[in-house]
Image: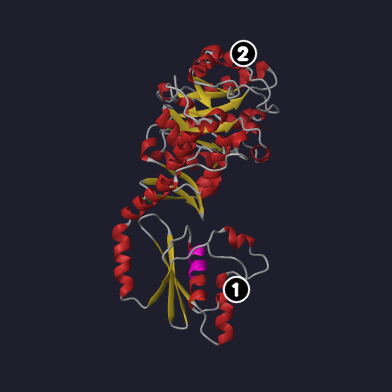
Amino acid sequence: MSNKGFDLSHYAGKICLAPMVRAGRTPLRLLSLDYGADLVYTEEIVDKRLITAKRIENKLLNTIDYVNDAELVLRIAPEEKGKLVLQIGTDSPERSCEVINKVVDDISSIDINMGCPKPFSILGGMGAALLSKPELAKEILESLVSISKVPVSAKIRVLNKREDTLEFAKMVQRTGVSAIGVHGRRRDERPNDKNRIDEIKEVVDYLDIPVLANGESGVIKEYKDIERFKEKTGASGVLLGRIALSNPSIFRKEGLHNMETEIINVLEKSCMYDEPFTQCKYVLSRILGSQLEFDPRAWGVEDRYYYWKKIHQERDTPNRKRKLEEEKDSDITFHDITFPMKRLRMCKSALTPKCFIRNYCFKEGWPQPTFTTWKRESDGRWEALIEVNNQKHQSRIAQMNRRMAEQVSALCAIISLGIRDELEGEWEE
């Protein structure tokens, strides 16, 4: 199969942020672009998560969000236009095509993970599992190339036999992809094992499409080392993973920033784009590395947090002013209350707020509570109003889904009725 006419220059000569689970999210991707990366890969996202996600235009952050229930699956910033490579994990030609049809207008290219050796991918038939299923890998890539309006690529590992690596890589090229990424370790090898530069070079010499070399993070310490790696392999471009996570400024030709600057810059982007705390914490812990137990704080960033919080609030000022005016003459009791969704999952013996308020109404002989829910146009979040015994209660803090909005509003009613002490568990955040 010939290439569909995609511009091979999309990948050719590019220095890229490699796909990394939990790390390749909006803040690190944008920081890498600021520092000089040519392309940035998303973390690997399983096809089903994107297929079931809802696409939302987030007007507060000026981003495109893909949200699945209460989970932010993917957030795309305007600065990533033409530079964002979506990597998916899949074992299905049909689902991979569903994904590209859904997201094609928001990404610059799509990459199929055929190299991840982690159990989750392998057991799901994805990642490096596809290296032993060349016919399925071929079908996935051919299906994507046949319908995609953006370049398609694949990322693989070297196989146990050199000839098998070359045969697999040639098959990938024949599907019509625009590039291939090659990690120089085998499926059962880990970062401490030597990167097989000579085997990457063999793939480069064997193919006619751009090859992106990967796997040298343990050796690369500064920008000029990237060029050395590129020269040794003869690769068209380079994928940087672990080194870009511990030192995002590796993409700067001018040199690395110190650790404190790296931390402050990551936090700045995290505040700008409302990155979930746990994801931000993971990236910071990788930057801190061995310093984590001695140096757990990032200094002087509180002002940046409140700065971006104020900016987000100002962007929503029309809505906030409208709400305040409505609240003055309203018969609703408002609260600034929320709690994380994990509290529901941890709630094994205690009742949830919604179950508790229903039981309370039954005990008091009141009608069962009623809920009114709606989705905000500004950011796709949900709000809910609960009516209990002719009294209305609502939280000003919107939630990621309808279920959470109703639970939080139920907690508001419990507090208003003065019966919070009767509800077991720590709920409020």
When asked about the image quadrant of residue 395, the answer is bottom left
Which secondary structure dominates the residues rendered in magenta?
helix
Q: Nearer the viewer, residue 424 or 68?
A: 424
Q: Earlier in the sequence, mark 2 or mark 1?
A: 2
User: What's the magenta region?
Assistant: 403-409
Residue 27's label in the rendered image is none
Q: Is residue 273 at least partly visible in the picture?
A: no
The answer to whether 271 appears left or right of 321 in the picture is: right
Q: Is residue 40 above or below residue 318?
A: above
Q: Amino acid at mark 2?
A: Asp
Q: Is residue 425 at least partly visible in the picture?
A: yes
Distance Cα–Cα, label 2 vs label 1: 64 Å
When asked about the image quadrant of residue 147, the answer is top left
The answer to whether 95 appears left or right of 36 in the picture is: right
Q: Position of residue 235 (x, y in %)?
A: 51, 16
Q: Nearer the viewer, residue 7 or 189?
A: 189
User: What is the secondary structure assignment of the residue under circle 2?
Assistant: helix
Q: Position of residue 399 (x, y in %)?
A: 46, 60
Q: Where does label 2 land, which residue? A: 198
Residue 423's label in the rendered image is 1
Q: Is residue 25 above or below residue 235?
A: below
